[in-house]
Amino acid sequence: MAFQKILVALDCSSPEAENVFQQAIKLAKSEGSHLMLFHCISWENEEKINPLVGIGALGNVNLHTTLKQFCQQRWTEQIEQVRDRLHTFYEQAKSEGVSVEYKYQAGNPSASICEQAYNWGADLVMIGRRSRMKWSELLLKSVSSYVLHHASCSVFVIQTGISYPENISVSNAQAIWN
């Protein structure tokens, strides 16, 4: 089965994005696929600061203005960083002869990746997965897990950042992982 259109979901703030990108390049070259590099800037960061802006309005108008400017500056910086990183990946893919485009938006990363894959008509979504322990992944609402269960196409999950406890051995592995 040849994948014609591959959506590559990248977390541009993560060092693991490079690994996901390199895997996508390999697959695109072997399949003759077109890539869309996609990043969603999470609203979660905004939600953490917005209550502070409201508090500032109650007591000090200058504090409200300062916090609002801080939020706007952070968003501008984040957008510039994402755009620059995606453009760097874009140029690298083009130099390797891969058909590529890129897009970024703000929103909920989990839902936005699935929506973008559907709207663009992707055959495959490639996404990285940080290796977290079972409970932390459940509590932290894994983006890759959501995409795996809700995407309208096949999903290729690339394991990144594997770290194991230093004291792990075959004899005590079951006790640690269960």
Image: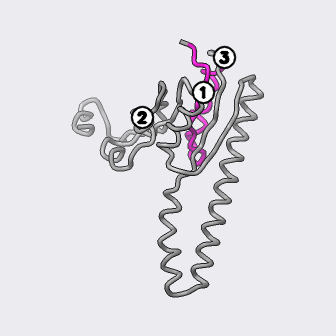
Whether residues under marks 2 and 3 lie with C-beta atoms below 8 angstroms apart, the answer is no
Task: Single out the residue that lies furthest toward the right.
Answer: 95
Q: Amino acid at mark 1?
A: Ala
Is residue 155 magenta-colored? no
Magenta region, residue range: 2-29
Picture disc at residue 150: 2
Q: Nearer the viewer, mark 1 or mark 3?
A: 3
Picture disc at residue 105: none
Q: Amino acid at mark 2?
A: His
Identify the element where label 2 is drawn: helix
Name the residue located 75 percent from the left edge and 22 percent from the top edge.
97
Which badge, 2 or 1, comes first in the chain's sequence?
1
Cα–Cα gap, marks 1 and 3:
11 Å
Task: Single out the residue that lies furthest toward the top.
Answer: 1
Give above or below for 8 relative to 106. above
Name the residue located 72 percent from the left edge and 35 percent from the top edge.
90
Identify the element where label 3 is drawn: loop
Q: Quadrant of residue 8?
A: top right
Cα–Cα gap, marks 2 and 1:
21 Å
Is residue 14 magenta-colored? yes
State the residue position of label 3: 32
Which badge, 2 or 3, comes first in the chain's sequence?
3
For this rendering, which residue is in front, 165 or 160?
160
For this rendering, which residue is in front, 53 or 163?
53
Name the residue located 34 percent from the left edge and 47 percent from the top edge.
136
Picture disc at residue 24: 1
Where's the C terminus, which quadrant? top left
Give above or below for 83 relative to 50. above
